Image (spheres, rainbow, N blue to C red):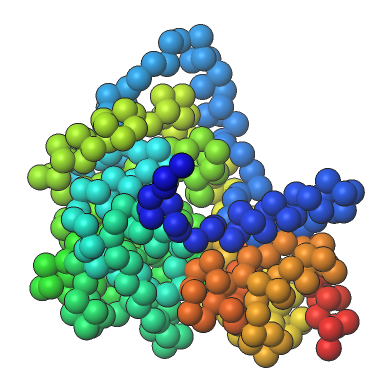
Amino acid sequence: MRHSTRGEVDPFIVMDVMEAARKAEDSGRHIIHMEVGQPGTGAPAAARAVLAEKLSDPLGYTVGLGLPALRGRIAQHYMDVYGVDLDPARVVITSGASGAFLLAFSALFDNDARVGLGLPCYPSYRQILKAVGLSPVEVPTTDAGRYQPQPADVADYNLDGLIVASPANPTGTMLDADALRALADACAVQGAAFISDEIYHGISYDTDAITALQVTDDVYVVNSFSKYFSMTGWRVGWMIVPADHVRRVERLAQNMFICAPHASQVLALAAFDCKEELDGHLGVYAANRTLIMDGLAAAGLTKCAPPDGAFYVYVDVSDYTDDARAFAAEILDKADVAVTPGLDFDPVDGHKWLRLSYARATADIAEGVERLKTFMEARQ
């Protein structure tokens, strides 16, 4: 049967690593999962109890933009956390952050538009852009620039749009208010759309994350209930758009998704009342972060991006290999630890990097670190 070129996108390598780890587990091996950015906890217990009481209700379609109560609660969240007075009408409930990106790219860009991505970055940006007929432009970043795009890149690469993430995946680095403002201003001068991926907000350590809405209203902000709220499998997120874009996005959402899952929206609304439990997860991530950084140093893996937030460490392994994918396979085979090769995030230099997630339980991270130390000692 005939097929389109839209499906000719690269695989999501971390999912291939997960499958290899699953097969290893099926053979009876105990695998430590440090490959996937999934919290080891589930959705908050009290929120699940609220949803359980609602399951006898029909839970049919919601309106395309999402439950009004949830949109209002998200707007209140922006006032409570960031001091941003946000009109709930600008909030769009989406089928995960992935659904938000599909809506954003469809609403903002025509075919062949040039959309900048600072390498390394979340790989699905690139693949979704390709699938909808847009041109991802891979912008190199540097350690000095904290592995984030720079304002000059917008004009230098003649961009129609720019995506930034803070905290970032895979590096964990963050942008402060001045850096976000400079990027937003550069986009405004160039006439480029500005998209801020903020799905790891709530997971930072030494300083709080800044939302792009604190520096500009001319932005699409994407967030999700997957990470801080620990609701990965429920597939619900949100997007903030300029007021004059709401109807445009609504029409797309109605036709592409009808609505985000109703049950997930009910759960998400209740999750806002579970701050104590959710902040407890942050304490686990902070402990895991210290544990993994100390363990990597003891294993000789000292070249890392500074993990300001999220729950990843991006590690330069070029002293040991020029094939991170093979190196990751060797670690899985010999140490029973699943890690992700950097090629997922950077097709240019990712062969020199690994990403390790510390989102799981502390006992798992401690065991994984010990296995990595033993592996590296045996390899030297």
Q: Position of residue 217 (x, y in %)?
A: 16, 56
Q: Residue at x 72, y 75 (%)?
A: 327
Q: Is residue 131 left or right of residue 17?
A: left
Name the quarter where the C terminus is drawn.
bottom right
Residue 86: give x, y in percent of width and height. 21, 45
Question: As rendered, which of 36 and 282 lies closer to the eye?
Answer: 36
| Residue that sits furthest to the front in the current view | 1
Is 58 on the left or on the right of 232, as rendered?
left
Viewer-proximal residue, 151 or 217?
151
Indicate whether 260 appears above or below 167: above
Residue placed at 47% from the left, 38% from the top? 235
Location of residue 19 in the rendering, given as x and y in whole percent from the top left corner:
69, 51
In the foreground, 279 or 228: 228
Q: Going 84% across and 83% down the picture, which residue do you hit?
A: 379
In this rendering, position of residue 117 left or right of residue 348: left
Relative height, residue 233 to residue 200 (above, below): above
Q: Is residue 241 above or below residue 135?
A: above
Q: Is residue 365 visible?
A: no
